[in-house]
Image: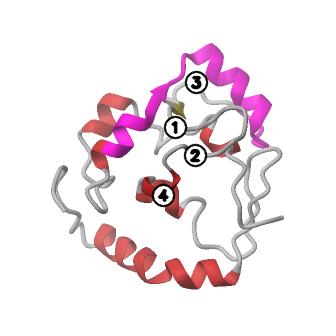
Amino acid sequence: MTNRCSGQCCKIFTIKGKSLDELKKLAWLDNEGDTEKTLNMLIPLPVDEARKRFYEFTKLEKYNPKFTNFTCQYLNQETGNCMIYENRPRMCRDYPGSNVGYKCDYKGCTFERDEDALLQNLPAAIQTRENFKNKQLPAAGTK
């Protein structure tokens, strides 16, 4: 395992099960003025394609057709590299979370968060969690 993501999670993912229209109404994406960047990267998957990708790329057992699934327009499908890596939204930088030794739910993923990466991202993760708990998130489109 490495601290380098192989892009499997960008081939199919959901954001709290919300549709694109529902996400447009939420300010919680806007940790650093990222809402527009995040919304622009999302490509909703048709149910049949989402089901196919779900079983092809995830280790999870049951597909839920009620969830809207997305793929990322900035994922290079051949290499698994992010084409906007240096400017990717906070949602992408923080994924898959801060658990040391985390094993991804995607088949073929090479990512495992190491302790140094956890410590580097810990202050921002704590602040984001506190803001969410206190509902002090900035309004969409503000920093």
The type of residue carrying mark 2 is Cys
141 vs 102, nearest the viewer: 141
The type of residue carrying mark 3 is Pro
Q: Which residues are magenta?
A: 37-62
Report, in whole angstroms, how far the alpha carbon at label 2 lies from the one at label 3.
27 Å
The type of residue carrying mark 4 is Glu
Q: Reading the chain from its start, which is encountered first: label 3 or label 1?
A: 3
Report, in whole angstroms, how far the alpha carbon at label 3 lies from the one at label 1.
24 Å
Q: Any mark on residue 83, and which?
A: none
Query: On the image, numbered disc 4 is attached to which residue?
Result: 86
Please tell me whether mark 4 sits on a helix, a strand or a loop: helix
Image position of 138 (left or right of 23): left
Query: On the image, numbered disc 3 is attached to which residue?
Result: 65
Q: Find residue 136 and report its image quarter.
A: bottom left
Q: Find residue 65 and report its image quarter.
A: top right
Find out whether the residues at labels 1 and 2 contact each other: C-beta distance under 8 Å.
yes
